[in-house]
Image (tube, rainbow, N blue to C red):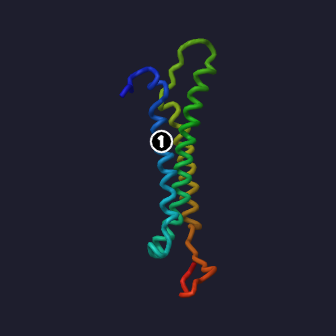
Amino acid sequence: INRTTRVCRASQPLFLHIICAGVFVLGLSIIPLSIDRGVASDRGSDIACMAFPWLICIGVSATFSAIYSKTHRINLVFNARQFRRVSVKPKDVVVPMFVLLSLNVIVLAVWTALSPLRTKTEVLAVDLFDRAV
């Protein structure tokens, strides 16, 4: 509603949106935990098992890299040599955010390629009708 006001522009809405998206992806990580072999096939269960760390890592790294970028931007403003106006554009602080995100994606891709997670069901107890408890 008031996007053009000085306070809203100073709060860096681009990074606020990225923080919200990161928290949303982090919340989505609960969904793969509800998928098991009773709901999906073995391959579907394995995909859900590997999707969990992807969603956690991408959500956390998006959130914290946006917070880091906002902090870096404030640091640039307050550590200026003289009391003069400092112009820090969003593209100046988006680079560290994309570096952090891309490093996480590289690590996750290597992990998924070399040693992906697999589901393993181990029945510890059965009831009277020989069903897993």
Number of callouts in the render? 1
User: Does 14 sit above or below residue 58?
Assistant: above
Q: Position of residue 92 (x, y in %)?
A: 51, 30
Q: Residue at x 47, y 73 (%)?
A: 43
Quadrant of the drawing holding the N terminus: top left
Q: Position of residue 85 (x, y in %)?
A: 53, 15
Quadrant of the drawing holding the C terminus: bottom right
- Extreme residue toward the bottom, this view: 129
Question: Identity of the amino acid at label 1?
Answer: Cys
Q: Position of residue 61 (x, y in %)?
A: 56, 46
- Extreme residue toward the left, this view: 1
Q: Residue at x 41, y 21 (%)?
A: 5
Check disc 1 and report its element: helix, strand or loop. Answer: helix
Q: Residue at x 56, y 41 (%)?
A: 65
- Extreme residue toward the top, this view: 83
User: Does 110 sit above or below residue 21?
Assistant: below
Q: For mark 1, what is the residue?
A: 20
Q: Position of residue 53 (x, y in %)?
A: 56, 58
Is 79 on the left or on the right of 58, as rendered?
A: right
Image quarter of residue 78: top right
Between 104 and 127, the residue placed more toward the observer is 127
Q: Residue at x 56, y 48 (%)?
A: 60
User: Does 35 sit above or below residue 9?
Assistant: below
